[in-house]
Amino acid sequence: MGNYYLTTPIYYVNDLPHIGHIYTTVVTDTVARYLRLGGNQVRFLTGTDEHGQKIERAAAEKGVTPLALADRVVSRYHELWDEYGISHDDFIRTTEERHRAGVERIITRLEAAGDLYQDRHEGWYCAACETYYTEKELQPGHHCPVHETEAEWRSEENVYFRLSRYQQPLLDWYAAHPEFVRPLSRFNEVRSFVEGGLNDLSVSRASLSWGIPFPGHDGQTVYVWLDALSNYITALGFGSERDELYRVFWEPQGAQRIHLIGKDILRFHAVFWPAFLMSAGLPLPTTVWAHGWWLRDNRKISKSVGNLVRPDALVASFGADPLRYFLLREMVFGQDAQFSDESFIDRYNSDLANDLGNTVSRLVNLSRSSFDGHSPPEACGSNPLISVAEEALGRYHEAMRELAFHRALASLWELLAAANQYLVAREPWKLVKSAGATAAVSRILWNGLEASRLVATALLPFLPRTAPRILAALGLLEPPASFETLTWGGMPLGVELPEPSALFPRIDKEKYLSGEAVQPPPPAPPAEEKKMISIDKFFETQLRVATVTAAEKHPNADRLLKLTVSLGEGGSRTLVAGIAQQYEPEALVGKQVIVVANLEPATLRGVVSEGMVLAASVDGKPVLLHPERPVPDGTPVK
């Protein structure tokens, strides 16, 4: 048990998300879900990097402001993460006030340490990387080694950080903390880079207006990487009075602070970021895990290269969980992997439709027909599958600790294969025909169902929507809240088994690749099958009637309104609501609405919101809820 802080990189908003962003976020979500099921306290952060020349240029090309472009792309991120079942606890935007305040606090500490000075900066600059490269690092023709785009020569007066001062402290840190960068190949890469010598780093830009003004240096904007990397602690409240999360997830010595990133941004996270933190006198991350690239035609999938993969068609046809499975099964974490629709379909048909789907379907159907729609009434206390399961689950946990997702999944499929071999060897379908639903048939089928239950439970971090459906098919309508049930013996006896539905309908590969229509994904469970809460839990939420006494546009966001509402004896509250595109402020004054009155305050684009206005969502647009007739402000809603 422990405290874990997991972060993805914050993603640039110069364009819509692609498979690289999806992979990193799915990986982090899988780790977060696994750790939560293990009883750990987890904080999972993702977000967007919204400053810098790349965003400024992309916005200009589209004829919009940088913030408008950011709002548009961030909206898509929220939709996408919901589609993929991402369970993040926070979403940070670098245009938020809480972030700016934290960045300024860090810079104050760097200044106090004597690590900032002003000088002229010249070099070859890649706008896509937001970094300078030496002649030696560039490809022929002064092309960026990552994006293969031509770098530009720049010369300007900037603020510098004394990175060279931290060469030896960093090497000492690496020696004392060999787990700081994983996998080992990336650790060796980082150490070798630092051993080669560190030059001081320009941490401001004079030719950029879209960013955070550099405190104490007029005309300078904070370098995007100093700005962006700081998000990991500004999102926890560093730099503000509300820093409780920082004191829980970053400050304590025993807290696990884990960054999950792509290998192309390893230097920023494993060299620059720890040097900034050392200078500021702040704790360093525990581990920086760097994964490989998804390739298409042996080239990195990238916006700049122009070979993007946005697997919308695959997800629309087969659901997000199969793609999650493919990404985690296909790539050896830390190495590169090839992406193609063909390989996705092959993995889907082989692993999901055949091995998992058919095994569960066969067992459930045979149990239903043998035991009048119920699971077997008698368990089996001793059989060869028990040791297979124990060994497979041991390998599963070991692999998950190493983020070896492909090995963790392979261990579960070994258990599935053993269960199938067990069934084939004993042929319970023949026993039912010849002798009926005997105790022997019950024990055989129960063993197969129990193996399937263990596999489905271990798949909860990987398939957050489908694994609960598998468990429901086995008569377990409520998925477990922890891994305490991940031991042999938990399959219930004699429970009703629902009418089965296809978990993974087989894909006709030829038809799909030719563009013909394919079967839609299996339906999501109806709302009433989702996790239920008790009436006591419901009444912890205080719903109250309130009257809007003032309303105005949010000063920093076109989509938000700032409302002042009266709760009667409960006083006045300020609320921020994302309803500006549907409601004019003046039309709301005097209207009664329903609000959540005991919600923890949150700062939304620089304005503190002290509750939430309730609205229905119709085609993604809010429709405010009102009482049928006027009632006193503060009236409880029950």
Image (cartoon, grey):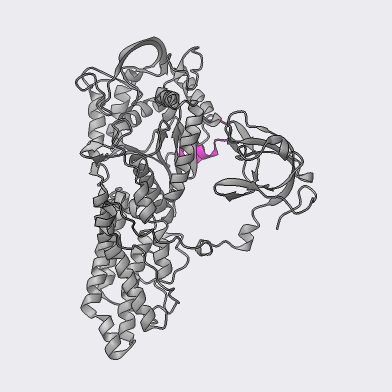
Query: Which of the two residues, 424 or 7, is positioned nearer the viewer here?
Result: 424
Query: Which of the two residues, 244 or 299, is positioned nearer the viewer here?
Result: 299
The verdict on residue 347 being magenta is: no
Q: Is residue 202 above or below residue 250?
A: above
| Horizontal side of residue 374 vs 597, given as left or right | left
Query: Which of the two residues, 411 or 360, is positioned nearer the viewer here?
Result: 360
Query: Which of the two residues, 129 or 419, is positioned nearer the viewer here?
Result: 129
**Whole-percent x and y of residue 179?**
30, 39
The residue depicted at 38 percent of the width and 62 percent of the height is 457
- Residue 87 in view in this figure: no
**Whole-percent x and y of residue 584?**
67, 36
Q: Is residue 46 above or below residue 170?
A: below
| Horizontal side of residue 361 vs 476, given as left or right | left
Which region is colored magenta? 240-252
**Whole-percent x and y of residue 417?**
24, 67
The verdict on residue 247 being magenta is: yes
**Whole-percent x and y of residue 508?**
27, 59
